[in-house]
Amino acid sequence: MIESQRQSEQEAISMQPSRNRVQASALSYLLDKSKSNASRREMEELAEKYGMDIGKLENLSDAQTLVPNTSDTESLRSPTTAPWLQNVVLRDLAFHEKYAAGVDARGDVYQWGEGAEPSITLKGKNIIQLACSGAKVYALSASGVIYALEADLTRQPPPDAWLWNGGNAGTFQEIIPNNQLSWGEKFISLSAGDNHLLALTSSGRAFAHPINSNANAYGQLGFRKFEVPVPSSKEHIPVELVPKSIADPYAKASPFKRRPSEPEETKEIPKSTSFPFCTAIFEIPSLKGIKLTKLVAGGRSSFALTSTGRVLGWGANEYGQVGLGDNVTLSTITVPTEVILWRMASPRTQMKCLDVSAGGDVTCFTLLLCGNGQYGSLGNNAYTNAQGSPIRARNVSNLTEYNEGTKSLKPIAPDSVSVSPTGHVLLTLDSAGGRDLLAWGKNYDYELGNGKRSSLAVPTTLIAPDGERFILQRKKAKEILDFQGNVWKRGVEVEQKAITGYSSSAVFWKLS
């Protein structure tokens, strides 16, 4: 094995064209070694063998998702302007753990992150929204087509080589619904969890897509059996992804009560199977006939908001993140179940959910939160490990302001809520004085932008770099640039939008 490694190293050296230009496989190997316990001397020797400067290698070791192409690998402790996005307006922006992706004003997708500068990965498809997972980036076009891209930039081919070739793993892939959509119907939104993808159509139909073999480990798909097409063939393979709680009901029981599970003769997606094994997205059977207005994926759970303001939830529920109440102790909800929010209201109060947001193990129903609050993510001034009954966030619920036009008080409604996979929340309140930005939850990596590393259990106003409270702006831009620095349009309405990522936060200019 050692001799084989030496031989591969020698081959990599011989094929190296110039310094600091290495093959993708070699770069991946060097980055893995830099994250291990290898000493600096060992890293210097490896860098020299591969013809790479040790300083360059150290700079690439950290996932620079916020400010790429910089030698500063320290965390950003407070809101910092990104010079490389000056006058650049985006359609969407998403941060994952080790990479980020954005859609510029032209609708082209760019990716950057660990060891990679911003580069175009999907061009000419008029993309309007992104959804990121560990292995794939999903892009939704204005015409309602879903594309899947490799999240690992080292596996991306040059954009000029991206031609349809029947499902090659190195190119983008089109995700096709198993049931043909109606005339004029199209996909309008995407939401990705850790292992599953949800998509909503313009007619209010719900679809789910298994990203990998763990896509239904907690029943988050909403179905178990489906057929996946075989690449370069007309055949279909029947697959059943059984939730863990059903496959092994005694998994968490003591050895005294545990019984061996009987083997089932079902086909499951092998862990080694790559993404092209499944190029379809499937309608959720139990939600047929129910018109939905929003479909949201948490880390391992799913939520659907109906046109009448009711909420259905299913998936992982160890921390109560589905919101079914403290009396429901099931760790997995395999069937879409209604979340009764009126339990948290006073008697004779009619309640309607306006919005749903989810991330990791935390769920937000407008301003009612539930799930894992050990970092203060529920905003109730407590650090609670599990909360099954949605509870109001402090300081931001039941707020009112005086309206000069109507000469009366009106409620201050939330404009948007973004819940991160790692446990912090950004809230935008839409008031007469502007759209205030508040933050709370986990703060181990300065993701709340207050210069500290202590978590906050109460929503707190974010302070802008000028020392004033952070108010998101709206304006008519004189000119809009794309990622290449070229002018796209002039005199376009834009607005600032706040988003969360893995231990990170950002505010960017978005097309209105």
Image (cartoon, rainbow, N blue to C red):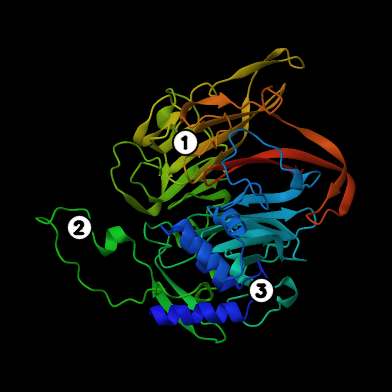
The image position of residue 91, as x and y in percent, is 73, 50
Q: How many marks?
A: 3
Q: Which of the marked residues, 1 or 3, is nearer the chain's N terminus?
A: 3
The image position of residue 83, as x and y in percent, is 75, 43
Above or below: residue 428 compared with residue 166: above
Q: Which of the marked residues, 3 or 2, is nearer the chain's N terminus?
A: 3
The image position of residue 152, as x and y in percent, is 57, 65
SS category of the residue bearing label 3: loop
The image position of residue 211, as x and y in percent, is 49, 65
How many angstroms separate mark 1 from mark 3 (CA)?
Answer: 37 Å
SS category of the residue bearing label 1: loop
Q: Is residue 112 left or right of residue 276?
A: right
Q: Which quarter of the image is occupied by the C terminus?
A: top right
Mark toward the viewer: 1 or 2: 1
How many angstroms separate mark 1 from mark 2 (CA)?
Answer: 33 Å
Above or below: residue 300 compared with residue 329: below
Q: Which quarter of the image is occupied by the N terminus?
A: bottom left
SS category of the residue bearing label 2: loop
- Labels 3 & 2 near each other (Cβ < 8 A): no
Mark toward the viewer: 3 or 2: 3
Three-letter amino acid code at the position of disc 1: Lys
Residue furthest to the top:
407
Query: Which residue corresponds to mark 2?
Result: 250
Q: Residues within 10 Å of mark 3 (few under 14, many from 20)?
A: some
Three-letter amino acid code at the position of disc 3: Pro
Q: Which of the marked residues, 1 or 2, is nearer the chain's N terminus?
A: 2
Identified at 65% across, 66% down, the residue is 20
Is residue 149 visible in the rendered image? The answer is no
Query: Which residue corresponds to mark 3?
Result: 157
Query: Which residue corresponds to mark 1?
Result: 442
